[in-house]
């Protein structure tokens, strides 16, 4: 089966299912594993924001949306040339990836008969469900079920380790300029790691807020995990906002690897957050994934 992934989290799922050799098309943001990008045609492009500050990125996104302009560009002719059997897309977040409706229209125009699977999870449990769905649609349901079972076993191990322990109040900052309180599956990660998510929107879209509102939630631990940033980027931003949370432990988190992409690595995120919250009963997180800044 010839697979095309139009979002990085779907690419993560494809590789976790052992289907990397079947993946023929990716986005410019798909980076796992980077060594396997050779031979994969980039069918979705977009602006490289790596040199922009969070405020500049937010202003760019808002201006594009106000103008009715797209944040991502589908290279339709390239997609047609790949003759895919299955295309993985989403409608969850227009800031994060190409919406499914735009893809469907392009496929109809091109006369492509590929199946389209839209992955739109809002909770951790729904994320695990998308892994099973990709396995079924790609013809490897046993692999999907086995992977989900293994991920659930890891979650159960964390739950057992933190059972009965005091749950610290945890705020996850998903963006810093303007500040966004975490939504979607991110509060579930905190809960699964043995924390109490505060100033959060479980199972709903993340929304802009104020620093005062975040501080008023009285978090004991603040995790700065800005969408699209690795640990280095998160650390710089965490250092800038740490003074807004006097008395709280402020940590930077590799958001791209552990928090914001709805795929198998969210379980890595649960384990890493649990190591921050309960270091005496949970093994330390891998180097380069979390860092305390205050």
Image (spheres, rainbow, N blue to C red):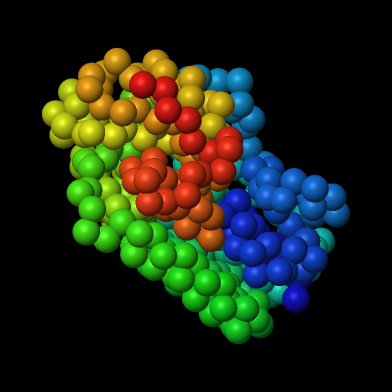
On screen, residue 275 versus residue 86, left or right, reads left
- Residue 190 visible in the current orientation: yes
In percent of width and height, residue 269 lies at: 46, 50
- Residue 210 visible in the current orientation: no
Q: Which residue is depicted at the point 56% across and 72% down?
A: 147
Which quarter shows the C terminus?
Answer: top left
In percent of width and height, residue 250 lies at: 35, 27
Q: Is 277 placed above or below 100 here?
A: above
Residue furthest left in the image: 216
Q: Which residue is depicted at the point 26% across and 27% down?
A: 248
In percent of width and height, residue 31 lies at: 68, 45
Figure quadrant of residue 108: bottom right
Q: Which residue is depicted at the point 80% across and 66% down?
A: 21
Figure quadrant of residue 39: bottom right
**Of residues 68 and 242, which is closer to you in this image?**
242
Figure quadrant of residue 62: top left
Which quarter shows the N terminus?
Answer: bottom right
On screen, residue 34 versus residue 64, left or right, reads right
In percent of width and height, residue 66 lies at: 41, 32
Query: How many dots with numbers?
Result: 0
Q: Is 83 placed above or below 251 here?
A: below
Q: Which residue is depicted at the point 65% across and 70% down?
A: 17
**Of residues 250 and 22, which is closer to you in this image?**
250
Residue furthest right in the image: 39
């Amino acid at each position: 089966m010839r697979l095309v992934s139009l979002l990085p989290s779907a690419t993560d799922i494809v590789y976790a299912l052992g289907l990397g050799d079947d993946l023929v098309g990716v986005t410019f943001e798909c980076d796992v594993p980077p060594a396997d990008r050779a031979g994969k045609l980039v069918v979705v492009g977009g602006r490289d924001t790596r040199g922009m500050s969070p405020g500049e990125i937010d202003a760019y996104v808002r201006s594009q949306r106000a103008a009715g302009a797209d944040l991502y560009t589908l290279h339709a002719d390239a997609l047609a040339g790949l003759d895919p059997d299955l295309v993985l897309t989403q409608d969850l977040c227009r800031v994060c990836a190409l919406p499914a409706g735009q893809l469907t229209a392009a496929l109809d125009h091109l006369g492509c008969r590929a199946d389209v699977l839209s992955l739109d999870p809002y909770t951790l449990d729904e994320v695990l469900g998308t892994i099973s769905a990709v396995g079924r649609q790609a013809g490897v349901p046993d692999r999907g079920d086995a992977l989900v079972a293994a991920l659930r076993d890891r979650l159960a191990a964390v739950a057992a380790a933190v059972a009965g322990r005091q749950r610290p109040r945890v705020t996850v900052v998903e963006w810093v300029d303007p500040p966004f309180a975490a939504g979607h599956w991110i509060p579930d990660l905190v809960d699964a790691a043995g924390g109490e998510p505060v100033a959060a929107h479980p199972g709903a879209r993340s929304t802009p807020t104020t620093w005062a509102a975040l501080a008023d939630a009285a978090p004991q631990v603040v995790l700065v995990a800005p969408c699209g940033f690795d640990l280095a980027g998160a650390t710089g931003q965490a250092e800038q906002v740490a003074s807004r949370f006097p008395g709280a432990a402020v940590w930077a988190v590799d958001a791209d690897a552990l928090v914001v992409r709805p795929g198998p690595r969210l379980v890595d995120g649960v384990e890493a957050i649990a190591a921050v919250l309960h270091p005496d009963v949970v093994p330390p997180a891998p180097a380069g994934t979390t860092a305390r800044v205050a």
